[in-house]
Image (tube, coloured by chain):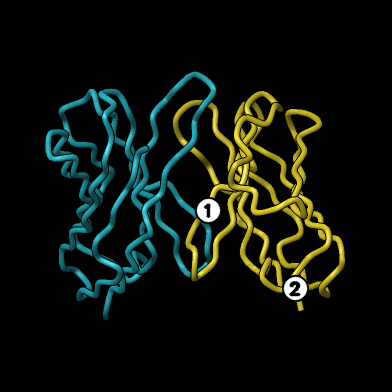
Amino acid sequence: AQTVTQSQPEMSVQEAETVTLSCTYDTSENNYYLFWYKQPPSRQMILVIRQEAYKQQNATENRFSVNFQKAAKSFSLKISDSQLGDTAMYFCAFMKPAGGDDKIIFGKGTRLHILP
Amino acid sequence: DAGVIQSPRHEVTEMGQEVTLRCKPISGHNSLFWYRQTMMRGLELLIYFNNNVPIDDSGMPEDRFSAKMPNASFSTLKIQPSEPRDSAVYFCASSLRFEQYFGPGTRLTVT
């Protein structure tokens, strides 16, 4: 069974700094998807970024980028020039597409505080 | 696109009462998921549907919980009878391919 591990329950950084959130996963699959979701205090779950395992290039969305290391089964999220609005819970997630079975496995989350 | 719509946003009920949570997925999406989130257990998948058919309900905690999807644009999650330990935020999410989009959640409080 696939598992997703986020080893940092909570982190704090100063505004404008760069922060990296860690995520490791366990799977025997070769084709899969990885995601980072953000849950701010409003509790809305927001998709931040997606990575396809068959792509070697790391995904980037504005200030958010990932470091995808397939062999190491690592998928970290880097937030550059952090802003107060980045304060949120961040969930790493894994999905193995299987024709109608689109179940996502979520990690326990990392609570990120951006300090003014 | 209005996104995933959930109602009600907040529900307070007494133990023993029936609770029905509602979800309207994004138009065109063919998979729908119900999650429960608590501080103790985090985000748990309860059940999901593909093309209105339940695929995996192994996360449903007990027989008091049931879910239906009568058509592609509507789903319900029912708890009967409700108990205080059911207090949580319940999310509905929908997807077409590989990305799930979440609704705003329903905060349920059972007293």
A65 on left or right of B28: left
Chain for disc number 1: B
Three-letter code, disc 1: Glu
| Residue A16: % across, % down | 19, 68
Look at the image and tell me in which quarter the C terminus of chain B lies: bottom right
- Look at the picture and state if A50 lies above or below A24: above
Q: Residue at x 81, y 55 (%)?
A: B20
Q: Are marks 1 and 2 on the same chain?
A: yes
Q: Nearer the viewer, residue A50 or B16?
A: B16
Residue B24 percent coordinates (x, y): 72, 41
Classify residue B76 as left or right of residue A14. right
- Quickly name the residue at label 2: B110
Q: Which chain is cyan?
A: A
Q: Label 1: few (<14), some or many (≥20) within 10 Å?
A: some
Whether label 1 touches label 2, CB < 8 Å: no
Q: Which mark is residue B44?
A: 1
Residue A72 is situated, as x and y percent measured from the top left of the image, at 13, 40
The N terminus of chain B, quarter of image: top right
Where on the picture, by quarter, is residue B85? bottom right
In the picture, measured across the screen, residue A66 lies left or right of residue A41, that is: left
Q: Quadrant of residue B25?
A: top right
